[in-house]
Image (cartoon, helix red, strand yellow):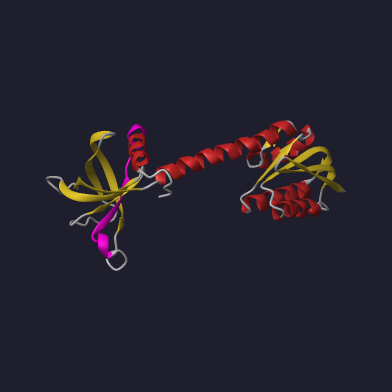
Amino acid sequence: MLEICFRKVNNAAVLDLSGTLDIDSSNLVEKVAWCLESGYQDILCTLDGIDVMDYAGLSALALAFKNTVNHQAVMRLCNVPVHIRKTIELVYLDKVLEIFPDENSALASFVQDREMSQIQNAKLRRRFKRLPLDIEMGLRSKQDKEFHTVKLLNISAIGMLVFSDKVYPLGDILDVRLSLKPIVYDLELRAKVVWLVEKKIQPQIYPGLGLEFCNLDPKIQEKILEFVERNLPLDSEV
């Protein structure tokens, strides 16, 4: 029989499992589901109290884990006895379920994950900040002999929107030439056409092109970010 003791540690749900993980362990799936419904995103199962686990018990463990993934939550194991771990490894469940040697290291991993996620989300939001502009720049395709002048309407670290009297097909790779003074002069890039402005929806900027930078050097991307952030209002969420 599987017994489950629930504890809350910081923002994590800790489930202390003891007894036997077998065909009668549906309460594990139910308890994990309850944790998810209660708003817990981090679930830790301690297994040092488990004496026996068979394949039916493994299935219950796998179902509980799958449920956490479906809810975009995290479930991890710790204090797993050697004989139980061997059973988990036999079916390669250790490749998807993270196992920690003790409770402290497992709980610390949740905190580290949240911190990294916040950092990554902040970086992503930063890359997508768009700065409205009204400056001239040059575009050229493989078929063009020379750059022709277009109007740059906005720019971010990943791309730009331009007003162009010449419309290029989706997927075309274009040479881009512009200056973002005083951050960077005579900037030459390559960009892919990923969006065409529709006249009925945005007639004021038709014909326009949405461009995505190709193989942008990280150092150049930082320069573009610096230009965008320097010129955006302090309270802007663009």
User: In this rendering, is residue 92 above or below 197?
Assistant: above
Q: Position of residue 170 (x, y in %)?
A: 28, 56
> In the displayed structure, does residue 111 sit left or right of residue 131?
right
Residue lying furthest front: 234
> In the displayed structure, does residue 50 sit left or right of residue 166?
right
Q: Nearer the viewer, residue 85 or 219?
A: 219
Residue lying furthest bottom: 200
Q: Nearer the viewer, residue 117 or 229?
A: 229
Q: Residue at x 60, y 40 (%)?
A: 114
Q: Residue at x 67, y 42 (%)?
A: 93
Q: Residue at x 69, y 31 (%)?
A: 105
Please tell me in which quadrant of the rendered image residue 85 appears: top right
Magenta residue span: 203-221
Q: Nearer the viewer, residue 122 or 135?
A: 135
Residue lying furthest left: 145
Asked if one can make out residue 217 in the rendered structure from this viewpoint, the answer is: no
Q: Magenta span has 216?
A: yes
Asked if one can make out residue 42 in the rendered structure from this viewpoint, the answer is: yes
> In the displayed structure, does residue 195 sit left or right of residue 66?
left
Q: Magenta span has 236?
A: no
> In the displayed structure, does residue 3 sit left or right of residue 129?
right
Q: Position of residue 47 (x, y in %)?
A: 79, 39
Q: Residue at x 77, y 52 (%)?
A: 31
Q: Nearer the viewer, residue 113 or 50?
A: 113
Q: Position of residue 171 (x, y in %)?
A: 29, 52
User: In this rendering, is residue 206 above or below 138?
Assistant: below
